[in-house]
Structure formats: C-alpha cells, structure tokens
Amino acid sequence: MAARRLASSLLSRSRAACSPSLSRSVFGGDRIHGSASGVLRGFSTAAAIEEPIQPPVQVNHTQLLINGQFVDSASGRTFPTLDPRTGELIAHVAEGDAEDVNRAVVAARKAFDEGPWPKMTGYQRSCILYRFADLIEKHNDEIAALETWDNGKPYEQAAKAEIPTVARLMRYYAGWADKIHGLIVPADSPHHVQVLHEPIGVAGQIIPWNFPLLMFAWKVGPALACGNTIVLKTAEQTPLSALLVSKLFHEAGLPDGVLNVISGFGPTAGAALASHMDVDKLAFTGSTDTGKIVLELAARSNLKPVTLELGGKSPIIVMDDANIDQAVEVAHFALFFNQGQCCCAGSRTFVHERVYDEFVEKAKARALKRVVGDPFRKGVEQGPQIDEEQFNKVLRYIKSGVDSGATLVTGGDRIGSKGYYIQPTIFSDVEDEMKIAKEEIFGPVQSILKFKDVNEVIQRANASRYGLAAGVFTCNLNTANTLMRALRAGTIWINCYDVFDAAIPFGGYKMSGNGREKGIDSLKNYLQVKAVVTPLKNPAWL
C-alpha cells in the first residue's frame, strides 16, 4: 500500500485547491521578447555535465520473443538502442520485420485456437496475472533501471511510481478475469436469448517509447484478462524493458505463444502487424499522423477494429480565483513531467488576465529550480529527451516560438554538449495561431496564454484538432462544472493533473483517438459480442 500511495503522489499533483494562497510575491528577472539571448540561467544542471552513472542492471534479453522462446530475427539483422544521456550504444537488438511478425502471429493464432489460455477459467488466468504482478514487484529496481537507461526518465520516477503502477494495473485486470460475463435478455417471442462476451482472438498491439511499460500494462492486461493472445511491437527507441517483463510473465506460468514481442521499426514490423490478415484486433498508442496510417492499414486488410490513443495539445485553464501557487506547481508538473514527453501534457496554459503576470513570474521561478541531469542521480526531476531526432524537434519548436514573437521567459537551449538535455523552457505572450500553441511539441516547453472570460477560453481551448485531456483551476464550483462539461476532452482534471488510476478510463475526443484504455471500458476493446437465440417450447414464463 505504501508503494501504491507513493506512486499515486508521484504520478499526480494536487493540493488544497481553495485554501488561502501562500505568499504571492512576484519574482524578479527580465523576460526577453523574440530572442533567446540573455535568458537567466538558474537551472540546477550540475548532474547533467558530470560523468554518467553506470546503470545498476545488465541487458540480458535482446532477441525477439516468439512462442515462448527468445529467437533471432529471420533476417539476422539487429539495430542499436542508445543511451539518451550520452547517445552511446546500450545494446544491439534483433530487428523484426514482416516475416518475424508472421511467425509471431502464427504462434499467437495456434495458442488461441489450440492452446489452453482461452479455455482456462477466468480464475486460472487471474492467478497467472497475480503471480506476474508479484514478480514485477520482486524485480522492481532492476526493471526500473532498465527503463531509465533505455528511455532517460528519472530512476526515482520509474522505481517509485511507474513500475509499482504496472503491478497495480496487472492486479486490477487479474481481478476482472473471472468477472467478465454475458447477459440473458428478454425477447418479445418465446425464445431464450443469451448475449456472450467472447475473447476477440489475436490482438496486435503497438506501444510507444515515452512510457514503455505503463503502455505495455494498459494493453496487455485487459487483452489477457479477456482470454486473448497477443503480438506486441515495442518502440524501436525503447525495446528492452518489455522483453525483460515478458520473460517474467512466462515465469509466472503464461503458456507459450500467448504473448509474443517483436522489436523493430514502424514501416516494417509495425506495418506488417497492422495489415496482417490473421490479426483480429489492433491497439496503437503514438502520434496522430502515424495513427492515421495504422487505421488505414487495418481497414485495407481485414477491417480489424482499432483502438487509438494518439496525440494531444491539452489546455490548462487557470481562473482568477484559483490558488495561484498550487496552479503554478501543478501546471509545471503537467507540462514538464517525463521531460514533457507525455501525450496529455498540459501544453497550453490559459491564465486569466488578472493573475497572468503573477502566474508567469512564479512559473519562471519554478522552472529555474527544476533539477535537470543524469536520471540515475537522486533528486533529478528531468532527464534527457529520448533521442537526437526528438531533441532537435523540440529545439526547432523553441526557435519557432522565438521567431513568431512569443516572449521567451526562461530556458530555450540545450544543456551541456553530451546527450539530449534541454533547459526547461517557458514562453509567455503566446497567441493561438503560433505553432507552439497548435502543434504537439512533446518536450519541456510551456506556453502560457492570456484570456479574459470563461466563454472566450472555452472557445479557444476547444479550437484544436486534439481532445485528450484538460485541467481546470478554480475555487468556484459553478465555474468548474461549466468548464468540465464544455471542454471537449476525454479527461478533465479539476484542481489537479495527471491523476491516473487503474479504474479511470483514458482516451480522447477528435484526433486524439478512439476507444478507451484502463477501467472497465478497456475490456470492451478485447471482447466480441455474440447473440445466441434458442426457441422455447411451452415456457412457464417469458
């Protein structure tokens, strides 16, 4: 329970929303309009320029996992996975392609059609899921270290929050495994009508690099609880942790072929999985543009149903009656958490004009205190971006913000000359038409916009192709109710942000995707509904 409470506190930020404000003194310091020069450099960055800490873990699994065995790719090719702290090699990993995907699908199909998994009772499946959760907890530190090494997220975040949450999610779905049932429904004629909820079959799953194991749990947990088999493709940037935990799954008693893991690239392995004719269901988390491709491939093949959890440009709305100190801290966390590499990051911070200047100055002060450095070092809040491509993309967005006339309040540059570290960056005087206010940056860049009234901010907040999440800060219940009903987003956090729980559904409106993950709604993604009608002769009742 202690680990669960700690995980909850690290994965969410909320305080006494409407208690009297703490000191609201305005922090000093000039802001620079349209220029990256002269920005105050107050970040705690010593850890970023020291020699990297040797990760306390070894890489033991770099092959594909097919039919319960670690095997080389059919082509024999490998690709490098790199340490984002340095850009240096961690390991060479088997590069799966269409032939390997087909091998995995064949194994998954056989395990579903002929194997014991879907024929087990729900209770039997739940026992394996529970044992897996126990093994996750037993190997928590090892798994967290591998996740940090391959991804760059702070070790404390992985070890104290994310990996315990993986175990919690697995226990949640273990609890559901023997509670999935159908219905008996009345008919207008003498017929007995059953509605069965059956496992859908072979599920293809494609997970992203920003939260490799959390997304593993979000997808694998409900699919297995429902009795399906899986072919899972990892992100090419972060292939290692899924291989390790999948080995633990087999130690927990998972039958061969039920969970197959393919490492590889989107245009080859990902496309092959999305378009495979013997995959019955597809789930994808990633960018909206890639989601469109996945959806098209699924439609062009066998019209398999697709769950999509895609991008976001989530608004945070700070009303003039909000606790400003609390709003500053939570908005900071909402954006900078996980190096800003979060689909639901609060990347458009709308602040009421009456408290705008105070908010900006306090947000700047908080950003300057943020500890950036080697994610294995204790106390570090922000590690490197995932890779050079994402690093350069974020820097281009920062340049775009400067060029478009937004005020660079702080940050705006890289840290050090090694690895992919970026200063926590804040822009004020941001306008809706600017790229930094419209496009998903996926980095440590906070954009602060000004608004006058509720009707205006509702219209502006909804004027986005995305609708994944939103945050509201106010002490007025009527205002909160107005906003939470008007905002077109899948999750609305009021006086908090990033509160994730196994039972809370997550997903988006508009081009942030379709379907829901987590909670009871996620089970629907992996169940087929069948109606069975039988005549009744001389029934005693109908």
Image: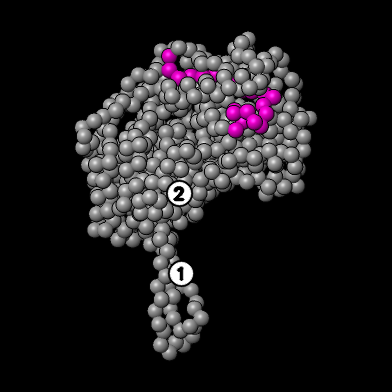
Question: Residue drawn 41% across and 84% down?
Answer: 536
Residue bearing the label numbered 2: 307
Q: Is residue 58 above or below residue 315?
A: above
Closer to us: 147 or 408:
408
Q: Say which element carries label 1.
A: strand
Q: Which residues are magenta?
A: 418-438
Kind of residue indicated by mark 2: Thr
- Could you say where residue 39 lies in the image, as x and y percent from the top left? 62, 12
Say whether residue 274 is left or right of residue 467: left
Closer to us: 302 or 134:
302
Magenta stretch: helix, strand or loop mostly: loop
Say whether residue 237 is left or right of residue 329: left
Number of disc labels: 2
Colouring of the image: one colour
Question: Residue drawn 38% across and 62% down?
Answer: 198
Instruction: Decide if residue 243 is in sight here.
Output: no
Sequence-first tag of 1 and 2: 1
Kind of residue indicated by mark 1: Leu
Residue 17, image quadrant: top right
Q: Name the residue at the right extreme.
A: 354
- Could you say where residue 251 lies in the image, as x and y percent from the top left? 28, 44
Badge 1: residue crowd in 10 Å (few <14, some 14–19, many ≥20): few
Whether residue 425 is in magenta: the answer is yes
Instruction: Decide if residue 275 is in sight here.
Output: yes
Whether residue 452 is in magenta: the answer is no
- Could you say where residue 91 lies in the image, as x and y percent from the top left? 29, 25
Residue bearing the label numbered 1: 183
Q: Report the Cα–Cα distance between label 1 and label 2.
A: 25 Å
